[in-house]
Amino acid sequence: MEGSWNDVRRLPRRIVTLEQFIVDTFTRIGEDGIERPVDQPDQIGGGGTYAIIGARIFIPPSRLGMIIDYTPPTLSKSMRDDLRKYGEDIWAFRERTDGHPTARAVNRYQGQTRGFEYLTKPLLLTPRSLLDTPFGDSLPSTIHFISYPAPRADMILSEILNLQKQLDWDPIIVWEPEEESLEIMERLANDIDIIGPNHNEVLRLFKPAIPSTPTETDLKSIYHDLCIRIANLRPKIGVVIRCGHLGCCYSPTAPKGSVPEVRWIPAYWNVHREGWNQEKVVDPTGAGNAFMGGLAAALDSGKGLDEAVIWGSVAASFTIEQDGLPILTVKNDKELWNGQDPLERVMIMKKD
């Protein structure tokens, strides 16, 4: 699935995330409001990690990159070995020298809502962070980032634009605008290729009126309208709103003067899918980030947005099937994820 991009640009294609590697811990807030530990071991985490593995489901390690800032006492050898199983070429391991340990965070679950909080100081990356790594030898063709903690997008985009002038670099930019302001989104949209909030983030951004007990139809109508509002800001490629079990609402950027067309695809695992049962959904942690990674892999391979959202949905489908990252195996020289070929799921979704 290398596509024709290498012939067109004569440059190696690579997707790199600017997100921090994180060790995830977990708690749950009960109906009594008390936070309690969850019987679940610490696991590999971070939105960037899930995005890169979401892309890895479709493309080889040589086309991916992520910096891992860590200290040996705070990132176990077993976790490092687990990362390497996805491909040595992906990871640039760097020992932290700023006196802080490997970044850790707590994921707090309350019903279907997840809260997130850093427990240690993160080392926030920017495009210039790549210059002193193997990824700086040939800058990436696609950049993924999440603006958490906000505001962060301004600084990242400013560096990208400066490097564009200095190095003739024009990456695809995939942005998850978590906790950014609407004013910042309006200002930056024209320089971003994909704006991809999830359903909670887009509601926080626009604060629309919502019925006290909204139906799925109510929610889909709200997401539809908000998708149009973001599409009217005219990102280069389009807008994607990840809506959990409702699927994905998206719109390619329309020609000037035209009304954006909003399209929907279902989540891969839904009650109408052959083989569906509730046990397919084990843990949604990172599924939205994996979606964005799968989408980025498609765009970086020369696919259009209609196919890219399918790749994203398939990447998310493997991510929710277990605690932590999906399992990669090889059988008869063919990569399988959780024992299945992701392209088979792509073909199934194309028939939906």
Image (spheres, rainbow, N blue to C red):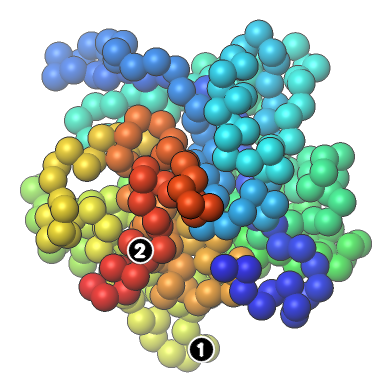
Tell me the tag on residue 255. 1
Q: Residue at x 70, y 15 (%)?
A: 71
Q: Position of residue 299 (x, y in %)?
A: 56, 68
Q: Is residue 283 visible?
A: yes
Q: Quadrant of residue 30?
A: top left
Q: Which residue is at 37% across, 36% downward?
A: 285
146 relative position to 7: left or right: left
* Residue in view at x 71 percent, y 43 percent: 89
10 Å crowding of disc 1: few (<14), some (14-19), many (20+): few
Q: Is residue 21 left or right of residue 242?
A: right
Locate residue 109: give its quadrant.
Answer: top left
Residue 85 is situated, as x and y percent measured from the top left of the image, at: 58, 35
Asked whether 316 or 147 is in front, the reply is: 316
Circles 2 and 1, Cβ within 8 Å, touching? The answer is: no
Q: Which residue is painted at 46% across and 68% down in the image?
A: 308
Whether residue 241 appears in this view of the structure is no
* Disc 2 secondary structure class: helix
Q: Nearer the viewer, residue 339 or 288?
A: 339
Q: Position of residue 45 (x, y in %)?
A: 49, 30
Q: Nearer the viewer, mark 2 or mark 1?
A: 2
Q: CA distance from mark 2 to mark 1?
A: 33 Å
Q: Amino acid at mark 1?
A: Pro
Locate the C terminus by quadrant: bottom left
Q: Amino acid at mark 2?
A: Glu
Task: Name the residue tied to disc 2.
Answer: 344
On the picture, is 329 further left or further right than 202?
right
